[in-house]
Image (cartoon, rainbow, N blue to C red):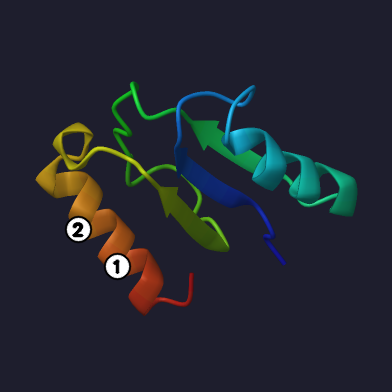
């Protein structure tokens, strides 16, 4: 079972993101982090994460492809 989480948002892992990242790290739950200044750029070749956390992530950093990928992944069970 893929338990990897895609966490997008907040400024950086040393700020507000530190709490959520720390909880997941302590629980042994792997995650990929994209800060709010970095475009997401999801690829259809990337494995589907078990869940998405989008926290204060700027909408202008998401492409139509990113939106479609997130919707498709959620509909498939993410």
Instruction: Tell me the quadrant of the picture where the N terminus can be found.
Output: bottom right
Residue in the image at 77% along x and 40% along y: 22
Instruction: Judge from the rendering whether residue 31 lies leftward or rightward of residue 43; answer left or right.
Output: right
Residue nearer the viewer, 59 or 14: 14
Q: Residue at x 45, y 43 (%)?
A: 46
Q: Residue furthest front?
A: 16
Q: Secondary structure at mark 2?
A: helix
**Relative to the observer, which residue lies in front, 52 or 58?**
58
Q: Looking at the picture, does residue 27 appear above or below residue 11?
A: below
Q: Secondary structure at mark 1?
A: helix
Cα gap from disc 2 to disc 1, whole angstroms:
6 Å
Q: For this view, does 28 lie left or right of residue 65? A: right
Query: What residue would you read off at disc 1?
Result: 72
Identify whether 69 is placed above or below 6: below
Residue at 67% from the left image edge and 34% from the top image edge? 18
Mark 2 = which residue? 68
Image-quadrant location for residue 68: bottom left
């Amino acid at each position: 079972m893929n338990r990897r989480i895609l966490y997008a948002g907040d400024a950086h892992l040393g700020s507000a993101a530190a709490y959520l990242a720390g909880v997941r790290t302590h629980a042994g739950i792997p995650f990929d982090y994209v800060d709010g200044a970095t475009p997401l750029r999801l690829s259809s070749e990337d494995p589907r994460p078990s869940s998405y956390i989008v926290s204060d992530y700027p909408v202008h950093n998401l492409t139509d492809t990113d939106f479609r990928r997130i919707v498709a992944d959620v509909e498939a069970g993410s």
